[in-house]
Amino acid sequence: PFIGLVWSDGCCCSRLASSDGVRCHSFQQVYYETQITVLPGCLVCCLSVCSDRSNIFVVSLSVADLVVAVYPYPLVLMAIFHSGWTMGDVHCQVSGFIMGLSVIGSIFNITAIAINRYCYICHSLKYDRLYSLKNTCFYLLLTWVLTVIAIVPNFFVGSLQYDPRVFSCTFAQTVSTYYTITVVVVHFIVPLLIVSFCYLKIWVLVIQVKHRPSDLRNFLTMFVVFVLFAVCWAPLNFIGLAVAINPLIIAPKIPEWLFITSYFMAYFNSCLNAVIYGLLNQNFRKEYKRILLELCTPRMLFVDTSKCGTEGIKSKPSPAITNNNQAEVDL
């Protein structure tokens, strides 16, 4: 059913096996750019915040974004080069599982971040008790346990299938009407409502009470991350919801270019978060610069590594010098 798909750039991706060795450069370009952006961006993000308890969920979100670049994306590139999936069903299922783990993990971590910011700003007196180190680790573990629980049913429904339109093993929206609707509601609409409620309450309180500029900047950063997530993922989820209502009638009417565009919008979201942190958050910019400086100057890597990058490199304070007491230098 997908023979001879042609995109606007004239690249016929379904005929890659022809004798002239045609390759779909647009797909390669998208995946190369995503790989190049996701890997360094997420790694630097993790290094820049790894020791701050309040940033645990940000690190977790970066890990979720990083997962897709490690395993599924290289397999997608192989599928593009070979004009189809040649790695077998096991790799297909594992790739689809890990990609789902990344997607749902990102959604649930964004939700956890919104709840954390809501408690920090709207319930500041209870925050230290609610988000002690022990509780924070428990919340993080719970986030990933729920993520795994949300993905496991795919194996029983058989919804992880290879889609030649996007050269990847992904969630098939036409397998089950009720399951697809459940996925869209649980994985997108419910988190969207929770995060919207949290940020709305935060915004109302921010208007009423003056907070520190740093708190407002952090709120703005995470709010932009949420908005970009909603914008990038909404088209694919709404297409899935429409297809689930009546697969036989609606699915053939969905333009292939629309599905492909919405698909790549969704997965391109993985490489945007680290960029947003760097653009909007001054602390992240400082840490990005410091980490890059350390990478360029290997000797500095051995200085103050116990702080894991949350404080600047500190030089040893020089002895105090006054008019009455000159510092002595041992020779």
Image (tube, rainbow, N blue to C red):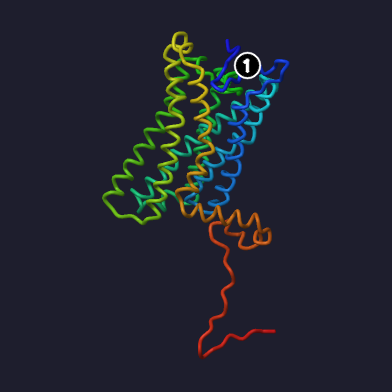
Query: Which residue is label 1 attached to?
Result: 14
Q: Position of residue 250 (x, y in %)?
A: 44, 12
Residue sitting farthest toward the left: 208
At 50% from the left and 30% from the top, the residue drawn is: 266
Q: Is residue 308 above or below residue 73?
A: below
Q: Position of residue 221 (x, y in %)?
A: 43, 46
Residue sitting farthest toward the top: 248
Quarter occupied by residue 318: bottom right
Quarter occupied by residue 74: top right
Of the residues shown, which amino acid type is indicated by label 1?
Answer: Ser
Q: Position of residue 104 (x, y in %)?
A: 51, 32
Q: Is residue 147 above or below residue 258?
A: below
At 39% from the left and 53% from the top, the residue drawn is: 215
At 58% from the left and 85% from the top, the residue drawn is: 327
- Please give left or right for residue 301 compared with residue 263 in the image: right
Q: Residues within 10 Å of mark 1 (few under 14, many from 20)?
A: many
- Please give left or right for residue 19 compared with residue 279 in the image: right
Q: Position of residue 238 (x, y in %)?
A: 42, 23
Quarter containing the N terminus: top right
* Disc 1 secondary structure class: helix
Quarter containing the C terminus: bottom right
Q: Is residue 312 above or below residue 118?
A: below
Residue sitting farthest toward the right: 19
At 53% from the left and 18% from the top, the residue drawn is: 172
Q: Tally the numbered discs.
A: 1
- Which of the two residues, 21 or 194, is positioned nearer the viewer here? 21
Q: Is residue 247 above or below residue 269?
A: above
